[in-house]
Amino acid sequence: MTDLLSLIYKKRDGLVLSADEINGWISSLTSRTPPPDYQISALLAFIFQKGMNEKETATLTEAMRQSGKQFEYKNFPKGALFVDKHSTGGVGDKITLPLAPLVAACRESLYFPTISGRGLGHTGGTIDKLESIPGLKIDRSLEDSYKILKKHRVCFLGQTKDIVPADRILYALRDVTGTVESIPLITASILSKKLSENLDFLILDLKSGSGAFLPKLELTDKLAASLSSVARESEVPCNVFVTRMDTPLGHYSGHRLEVKESLAILKGEGPAASTELTKKFTERFLIFSGFASEDAVKTIDRKIQTGEAFEKFKDVIEAQGGSLVKFEKAVKENKMKTKVITAKEKGFLHFDVRKLGLALVELGGGRKSKTDIIDNDVGFYHPFETGDRVEEDQEVLKIYYRDKKKLDDCLQVLETAVQIKIESFPKSPLIRKVLV
Amino acid sequence: MTDLLSLIYKKRDGLVLSADEINGWISSLTSRTPPPDYQISALLAFIFQKGMNEKETATLTEAMRQSGKQFEYKNFPKGALFVDKHSTGGVGDKITLPLAPLVAACRESLYFPTISGRGLGHTGGTIDKLESIPGLKIDRSLEDSYKILKKHRVCFLGQTKDIVPADRILYALRDVTGTVESIPLITASILSKKLSENLDFLILDLKSGSGAFLPKLELTDKLAASLSSVARESEVPCNVFVTRMDTPLGHYSGHRLEVKESLAILKGEGPAASTELTKKFTERFLIFSGFASEDAVKTIDRKIQTGEAFEKFKDVIEAQGGSLVKFEKAVKENKMKTKVITAKEKGFLHFDVRKLGLALVELGGGRKSKTDIIDNDVGFYHPFETGDRVEEDQEVLKIYYRDKKKLDDCLQVLETAVQIKIESFPKSPLIRKVLV
């Protein structure tokens, strides 16, 4: 057993942990004699309070990465570049779905192996959204995933036990000890997972606003800086975006509704914001791969117009066992009832996005406990954004529901989630900041 | 299970815990479904960092007291006053031994039920010292202890599982999570135990200096203020003394040597400092019981001169199964070898008392692990105090040892524990502060 007590004292007293100390701690977590939970949680609490400097955070990130399996791309074409995007999540954030195939459609050398998670709290999960496509299978061996990736240059993967097990251990403790919202711990958690994908380039999308994992803008900015500097320390080219989550992203929330919106984006028929973000990220990937900015934009539009982007998504979905035909059929058969929320007076729309996400969970479109089964068909249509001017009686939210009881629970949460403000207020920009 | 997470969040974010929250937490500790250790330790870590206000600390103290059995003095004489003294411990602090019988000898109405602990780290324990008297038994039922107390007005008790179990649970966790040195947590730990003795008056002796549990003077002063105010909040009259532990107390350290010094104090033949402190505390107890200060001092001296104080101690020891005759015999039979340390040059003596205590542990006069058996006969004679002027070659420490190997280990620690400073420096007063 590694005795964590000396590390606890040091961190408690505001001292800096050495690389040996951090490495010893993290490697002990997955050893046969891990330290007791109560010492880990005390150490996490003191790290929460006292922070970690850039070097400590980078060491922690690397130690956590080393705790698990690393991706190895054997026998891939020469010049293959492996890229991914990670978002801290929110409501309506389906960007990974259209992004990966669009990037792959635009550039032959780009490979997009993307590990995603499941829904958590008020936020949806990319894996859950993908699994609303009938037949689609995420849980497969890494070898199978490499095969799909090699052929289609995109593969959607779920988190496995092999990848950064130290993060899983620490996160489970942080979740129940009030130590989640720590900049160095979040940095190490996010980056260790992404770095174990052995990437050539990474985009991180930090959400800010009421629906973000970290609602405080100040913390988001700190996290952006921390992620950027630790990625640099780890010598992985990385762009950190700070984007708005004070309004749901795009026009739809809910699993199948978001897949539909993703398909629309790939066909050039998507809502403005989710389309813009998908394209902006794609542009960055293309520029990284050697495109001039102007060429990148043109290529993106062309690949959408020609249908190649959509075809790429279809191919990947099918390679992973899914069927878009069956998806369309399932959507038709599960016709949802709808309930429309209108503006009670004219004014300016304001979403509490976290509550909106929780209202979606009430509807059945998210899990309250791990074993809950998601209702893929429920969801919201939200044509306006926070800050938009709306008239009296104008439709601001359409609810797709199955169960009257659940609708009632949802409506109760929505009462404070969707409001009309009399005074106008500035709309947040979609992209607030990019750290290159 | 009480969910501690909301308490963790509050304390983490610098908020004040409500009485209900504190009571719920503490009562859950001894419930059938206690909260998980990792949440308790996270909460302790955030309390360590953010502190607790006076009201929170008083509530915590009372909740902890309520977690266990309270002393109930049934069928004691009308007007009986129950008193005790608690010291935070150090090296050579044997004051409880002569104090309890002296107080009882001086005043018929005073009853001295005193719960003491065992040695911990570099500090000795009153119970261990008493157990160096052959036959003496501390572990007895509370009913038996009441009988001894009723008859002799003194009873030495050990800590039992019934008294403040919440403190035992919390202390065990604090000890291994770096959360010991917290003013509110120490306050609640000390006072909850003492308050469960159902006292009419209490003296707390906080040690300050290199051998103290809290070496930082600033922390000691804060702790004194916290103890004093929380005792007031709990409506228990209490005097808080801050006394020096930058030099060992009295002339002897080591279990039997300290019992011998205690006997000497009761015979009026003790060293100046340990005698003075014993008398000062006794005076406070007597004044509390109605004596004028002058009368108290006279009575103390008379009860020592007449031998009544010594007889009282002998009676209590015998009532608890001990024999002073056998004690003297054991001391004679276990003749220790001695090694004298002299001043290398003239100057001013300086003890690092913590190290001196650790050197005593090396000698066998303390435990390194819980199962170690104490060698009662080893110890130190230290005729001078920190700050005293000593001449070259003057004896500053005599070591009573049994085992050459242990002596060597002891001497190694002593090298930095006993030093001669060329420059003079001010001696600390024996009593630095009294909060009444």
Image (cartoon, coloured by chain):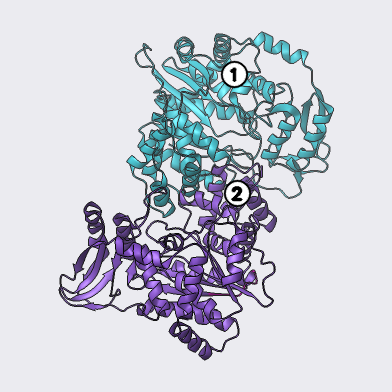
Chain colours: A purple, B cyan
What range is drawn magenta here?
A234-239
* Residue B266, disc: 1
Residue B261 x/y as whole percent: 65, 22
Label 1 marks a residue whose chain is: B
Residue A11 x/y as whole percent: 59, 54
Q: Do badges 1 and 2 share one subunit?
A: no
Task: Name above or below for residue B106 compared with residue A259.
Answer: above
Task: Name above or below for residue A17 compared with residue A91.
Answer: above
Task: Name above or below for residue B413 compared with residue A175.
Answer: above
For the residues labelled 1 and 2, the Cα–Cα distance comes to 43 Å
Locate the C terminus of chain B and report the quarter of the image it occupies: top left
Relative to A104, is B22 on the left or the right?
left
Q: Nearer the viewer, residue A268 or A406?
A: A268
Q: Is residue B383 visible?
A: no
Q: How crowded is mark 1: few (under 14 residues within 10 Å), some or many (20 or more)?
A: many
Q: Nearer the viewer, residue B197 or B15?
A: B15
Label 2 marks a residue whose chain is: A
Q: In which quarter of the image is residue B416?
A: top right
* Residue B344, disc: none
Residue ID at (64%, 43%): B427
The amino acid type, in three-letter code, at marker 1 is: Leu
Relative to B165, is B384 on the left or the right?
right
Residue A104 x/y as whole percent: 54, 76
What secondary structure is found at the residue carrying circle 1? helix
Residue A132 x/y as whole percent: 40, 61
Q: Which of B143 and A235 is in front in this view?
A: A235
The amino acid type, in three-letter code, at marker 2 is: Tyr
Task: Name above or below for residue B390 compared with residue B153.
Answer: below
**Magenta span main SS:** loop
Residue ID at (62%, 64%): A58
- Residue that numbered label 2 is attached to: A9
Whether residue A238 is in magenta: the answer is yes
